[in-house]
Image (spheres, grey):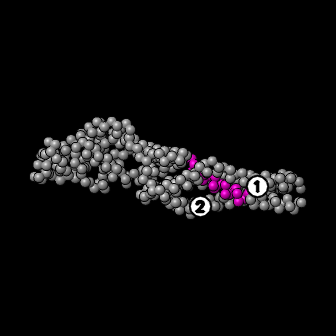
């Protein structure tokens, strides 16, 4: 009977070693992924999103100004987006980028929790952008637009007169006798008036559905990911019941004194904590990049891949820091129990 009890205790110790290490990684990963505030912080604090916006800002700002110029009755202008980069960055406030990113993350989590694709919608607050467009940043952008216009030819002058009298389209050129600064100031004034006459744009913003253009196959993958999210959010903590049950089994079949407590619980805790620390070092060195690519595969388009990689690196750091902390505590507790067993043995001797 004594041999059988020890065999069961040894098997329970091996079971604790495996299940405790597994729970350390999986439960902490689930806690990080389901913590929307941690994800929001990773998205807004890594700086990757701001860098991505800096590359996309010229196209965005160009489109915004072209739309307002069209509403103001001005002709469309073809401008090199590379030349707009500096002015566009000034037009889009960094605080606005962070606020919209937080809104987008919350919209994704609303979808994950409800399953309603309509919940994955972001309403962009356009008021800060339009306020910038009405101010000095917008004037700088308009001046840059105007500086690319050629002088009007004879035919252009005639078309310009017809356009101003409502008889046709206004050509994209600088009229004779009108300086670039004067034309830019007039165009900026017209755009500002167009914005002020469209209060609905500033009041309601622009709503973007994050899942509207996603193919059905991608939606199915996303739905499977959502089911995994719900499972992790609700039941991941139960993985800790397995190592706890192993410790209780060891206590029932092997622990009879302080010394046996220290030995039978000390060694499994020490080995599990040490193994988890080694595995965490391995994951940190080898798995982060591959996990980032896997996470990015759920989002169509590759332009934002580098942003997702930086976000995952931040989440990976948070995940492994929690693993390091808990594995270190487990390793330290195991050593303490082994020392207690050694002390109890000396006292008994």
Q: Give the prevailing secondary structure in the magenta stretch.
A: helix
Across and down, in percent, residue 217 comes to 48, 58
Could you tell me if residue 15 is visible in this image?
yes
Tell me what residue is drawn at x 31 percent, y 49 percent: 63
Q: What kind of element bears circle 1?
A: helix
Tell me what residue is drawn at x 31 percent, y 56 percent: 82
Tell me what residue is drawn at x 86 percent, y 61 percent: 4
Across and down, in percent, residue 267 comes to 76, 58
Q: Is residue 347 above or below residue 125?
A: below
Magenta-highlighted residues: 16-38
**Which residue was labeled with disc 1?**
246
10 Å neighbourhood of mark 1: few (<14), some, or many (≥20)?
many
Across and down, in percent, residue 242 comes to 72, 54
Across and down, in percent, residue 298 comes to 49, 57
Q: Which mark is residue 58?
A: none
Would you say 243 lies left or right of 286 here? right
In this view, the mark in front (1 or 2): 1
Q: Quadrant of the N terminus?
A: bottom right
């Amino acid at each position: 009977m004594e041999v059988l009890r020890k065999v069961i205790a040894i098997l329970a110790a091996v079971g604790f070693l495996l299940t405790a290490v597994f729970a350390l990684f999986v439960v902490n990963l689930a806690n990080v992924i389901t913590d929307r505030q941690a994800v929001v912080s990773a998205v807004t604090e890594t700086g990757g999103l701001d860098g991505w916006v800096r590359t996309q800002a010229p196209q965005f700002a160009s489109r915004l100004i072209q739309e307002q110029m069209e509403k103001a009755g001005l002709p469309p202008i073809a401008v090199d987006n590379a030349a707009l980069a500096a002015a566009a960055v000034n037009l889009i406030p960094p605080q606005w980028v962070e606020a919209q990113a937080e809104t987008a993350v919350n919209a994704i989590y609303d979808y994950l929790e409800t399953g309603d694709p309509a919940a994955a919608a972001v309403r962009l607050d356009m008021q800060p952008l339009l306020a910038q467009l009405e101010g000095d940043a917008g004037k700088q952008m308009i001046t840059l637009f105007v500086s690319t216009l050629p002088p009007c030819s004879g035919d252009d002058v005639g078309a310009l007169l017809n356009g101003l009298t409502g008889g046709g389209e206004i050509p994209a050129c600088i009229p004779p006798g009108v300086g670039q600064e004067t034309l830019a100031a007039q165009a900026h004034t017209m755009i500002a008036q167009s914005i002020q006459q469209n209060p609905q744009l500033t009041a309601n913003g622009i709503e973007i559905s994050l899942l509207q253009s996603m193919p059905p196959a991608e939606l199915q993958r996303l739905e499977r990911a959502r089911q995994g999210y719900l499972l992790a959010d609700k039941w991941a903590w139960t993985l800790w019941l397995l190592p706890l049950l192993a410790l209780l089994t060891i206590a029932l079949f092997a622990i009879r004194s302080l010394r046996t407590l220290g030995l039978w619980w000390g060694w499994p805790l020490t080995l599990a904590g040490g193994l988890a620390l080694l595995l965490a070092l391995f994951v940190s060195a080898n798995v982060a990049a591959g996990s980032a690519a896997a996470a990015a595969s759920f989002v169509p388009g590759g332009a934002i891949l580098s942003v997702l990689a930086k976000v995952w690196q931040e989440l990976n750091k948070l995940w492994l820091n929690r693993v390091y902390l808990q594995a270190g505590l487990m390793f330290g507790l195991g050593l303490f129990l082994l020392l207690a067993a050694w002390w109890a043995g000396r006292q008994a001797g």
